[in-house]
Image (cartoon, helix red, strand yellow):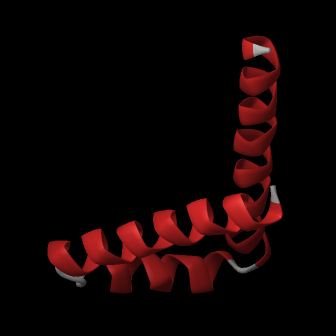
Amino acid sequence: MGSEFWHQLLIGFCLMLVLEGIIPFLYPQRWRNLVQQLALVSNPTLRITGFVSMMAGVIMLYIFN
């Protein structure tokens, strides 16, 4: 049972890497501009954005699982 959890977690991590790589692969200049803009965002704003993103993921996992 624990092994199945780690297997599913690894699959999810691999899919995340694939999805995260699509935009820089297709639009490298746009990605570079986005990263430069993100460097100007304050730490509290990034923390809130990260928290909201994590909570949205947890809620979606709960709903769809």
Can residue 19 be seen from the camera position used here?
A: yes
**Quadrant including the C terminus:** bottom right
Most foreground residue, 44 or 57: 57
Q: Horizontal and vertical percent for residue 50?
A: 39, 68
Indicate whether 49 appears above or below 17. Answer: below
- Quadrant of the snapshot with the N terminus: top right
Image location of residue 24, percent across then percent down: 67, 69
Q: Is 7 above or below relative to 9?
A: above
Q: Residue at x 72, y 80 (%)?
A: 27
Viewer-nearest residue: 58 or 34:
58
Q: Residue at x 76, y 62 (%)?
A: 19
* Quarter holding residue 51: bottom left
State how many labels appear: 0
Residue beneath the point at 49% across and 63% down: 54
Left or right of residue 28: residue 54: left
Q: Is residue 39 visible?
A: no
Q: Is residue 30 left or right of residue 12?
A: left
- Nearer to the camera, 10 or 17: 10
Q: x%, y% of residue 13? A: 70, 41
